[in-house]
Amino acid sequence: MKLTIHDDIKKIPYYPKAMMYGYDEGWVRLSSNENPFPPSPKVFSSILDALFFTNRYPGGELELKSAIAKKLGIAAEQVLIGNGSNELIEMTLKAMKHGKRNKVIISDPSFAFYAIAAQVYGYEVCKVPLADMHVDLGLVGKQIDKTTRIIFLNNPLNPTGTIFEQEHFENFMKTVPPEVLIVVDEAYAEFVESAQFPNTIKDIGERPVLVMRTFSKAYGLAGLRIGYGIGEESLIAFLERTKQPFSVNMMALIAAQAALSDGAYLKKVLRNNRNGKLYFSKALQELSIESVPSEANFILVKLGKDAEAITKRLFEEKVLVRWMGAYGLPDFIRVSVGRMDENRRFIEVLRRVI
């Protein structure tokens, strides 16, 4: 039997995954913005203790909400837990469905799943180009009309690592109608050093804002898939209604709470990231290669028309980086900050390849 699939679904692109070859020590994995360190020892200890209870449905969500709320100085009822940020994105799209308001605005390029998920749920997607590798909130604002329902803002922006600043965000928010939800994806917030990074959480309750964060990056739990959202209590309650029961597994819930409690581990990760970016900046300057200053745990590197070919050459040397052709930036590669030995290996092979 041949099933008929709607043309709108056929038009949806696949999510552009990075090459994920090998977990052995021979590979240098700098393609997926991952934390180069294993999680906190507290995470391993908590997971081992929980293994004997895997015959039970996941518990611990209320405890994790309370821990996040305490850290951020908000109420636990303002926290939403999801199976990675991707589930939060889907919950948002499901809960915000509105007959007359059916447009989603995103920056282009940005995290690819915004557009993919929006199309899956039947939204019209409006893509707004960057200005000098930055999200231009003025340009985004000009696209708002009576059909707009959700605006996804990625800050720091994947794949450029740039941010929009507090003053620009405040001015932008004044122009957004109350019927439009602003979703600010701050997956890389922990890595930001700029004093001008917006304090988006303070806008919760005053304006329709949902802030998304994750344990995948700075806390090293990408393989367990757990993220969280922060919003006004009634908004969070509506989003919760669209969530699958027990969508976040027991190990992820327990690991996230343990990771949140280990401040020393987080400091080590952030120190490594800072030193790695400084090393990349100096090494690339010595090679006369341009890069975009980043507030995240990756850098965007301009290699010109040979960027894809160089990516393949690096792969042959077991160095994984991300060619940005799928993001409309064919002259660039994106390189995650690894351990210092991995960073040096990338520069060593890049120097030889070019």
Image (cartoon, rainbow, N blue to C red):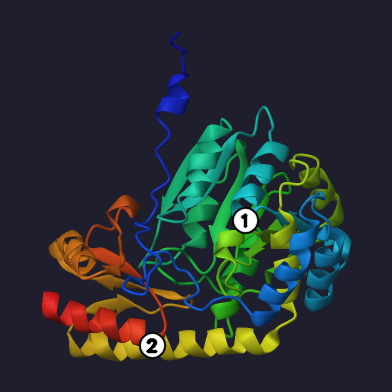
Side of 166 relative to 259 (left or right): left
Q: Position of residue 270 (x, y in %)?
A: 54, 85
Task: Identify residue type, mark 1.
Answer: Gly
- Residue shown at the point (12%, 80%) measured from the top left: 352
What secondary structure is found at the residue carrying circle 2? helix
What secondary structure is found at the residue carrying circle 1? helix
How crowded pointer 1 is (Cα within 10 Å; few <14, some 14-19, many 20+) is rated as: many
Q: Is residue 99 above or below residue 209?
A: above
Q: Is residue 36 above or below residue 193?
A: above
Task: Identify residue type, mark 2.
Answer: Met
Whether residue 176 can be seen here: no
- Residue shown at the point (75%, 80%) measured from the top left: 261
Which residue in the protein does label 1 denote?
Answer: 84
Q: Position of residue 288 (x, y in %)?
A: 17, 84
Side of 255 relative to 17 (left or right): right
Q: Quadrant for the N terminus, please.
A: top left
Whether residue 37 can be seen here: yes
Reading the chain from its start, which is encountered first: label 1 or label 2? 1
Which residue in the protein does label 2 denote?
Answer: 340
Q: Quadrant of residue 351?
A: bottom left
Q: Position of residue 68 (x, y in %)?
A: 78, 70
Q: Residue furthest front?
A: 52
Q: Which is nearer the eye, 119 or 251?
A: 251
Q: Quadrant of residue 186?
A: bottom right
- Residue shown at the point (68%, 37%) measured from the top left: 94
Q: Is residue 150 above or below residue 44?
A: above
